[in-house]
Every structure is written in C-alpha cells, then in structure tokens.
Image (cartoon, grey):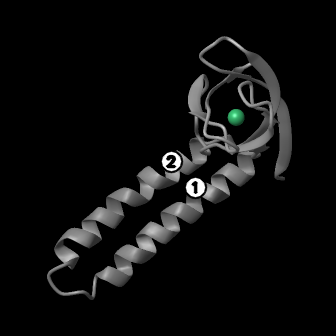
Amino acid sequence: MTERQSRTIKLSNADGDTTTGTLNFTVYSKQQRMARGLTALGICWGLAAVTLFIPIAHFVLVPGFLIAGPVAGFMRYRLAETLEEVTGECPTCHEQVTIPVEANDRFPKWTYCSARNDPVQLSEA
Ligand SMILES: [Zn+2]
C-alpha cells in the first residue's frame, strides 16, 4: 500500500547559513511498483493501437509507442519512492516555505525559496 513518509533535510544558502526542513515522499510496495509499471506499458501500447489508424503518422507513432511502452514501464517500476515537497525555514529570508521537488530528484540540489526566490540548496541531513 501507498505509504507517505517524511525525513529531515538540510536547507542551506551560498553564505553557509543552514536550517532544517522536512522532505515528504511516498513509498511504493513491490506490488504497487509492478502495477504502476504495467499501467504505463498498457497506456503506451494502447496509444500504439489507436495511432495504427492514423495514415502516414502511424509509420512513426506505432513503433515509437511500442518501444516507449517497456521503457516507461521499467522507469515507473524502478521508482520505489516519489518525492513531493520540502517544507521548512528558508536560510536567507527565514520565512516558512514549501518547495516542490520532482519525483526523482537527487540531493544535493539547488533550487529557489518559494517566498522570495532566494537560492537554496537542499541536501540530505
Ligand atoms: Zn527565502
């Protein structure tokens, strides 16, 4: 089952000021990862079947979706956890901020404070 978890993360700026925040993420079980992978595969192959009936474009779209299916499926299967957001105090403006992160981001990562666009580095605490 889907499990939302959080862990402590470090927010720092170029001047060396550091605060701590919370990283929220979702963890998937092996069964869910398989289901997510198969869903991506099914969508791609479904699109391949639909685009079969589009003249000329089907020469590109059908093989494209047939190849994209297993690739997208494997990428979804491999993703054991998806990152969601970081909440914490900005080390520069000291406001409470929520910074969205990409599902497969890796840390350390430079991003911007959502309150005043200050550069902020997120890194594992
Ligand atoms: Zn800020």
Instruction: Specify whether 6 is left or right of 46.
Output: right
Within 8 Å of ligand 1, the CB of disc 2?
A: no
The reply to whether residue 125 is visible in this rendering is no
Q: Secondary structure at mark 1?
A: helix
**Residue drawn at the location 58% of the way across and 64% of the way down:** 39
Instruction: Specify whether 81 is left or right of 55.
Output: right
Seen from the viewer's position, the closer of residues 90 and 41 is 90
Tag 2 residue: 74
Q: Cα distance, mark 1 to mark 2?
A: 6 Å
Q: Secondary structure at mark 2?
A: helix
Q: Amino acid at mark 2?
A: Phe
From the top left corner, tell me how far across and down residue 107 is, in percent. Answer: 61, 25
Seen from the viewer's position, the closer of residues 116 and 13 is 116
Mark 2 crowd level (few <14, some 14–19, many ≥20, 10 Å Cα) = some
Tag 1 residue: 37
From the top left corner, tell me how far across and down residue 38 is, in percent. Answer: 57, 60
Q: Which quadrant of the figure has residue 120? A: top right
Q: Amino acid at mark 1?
A: Gly
Instruction: Specify whether 57 is left or right of 90.
Output: left
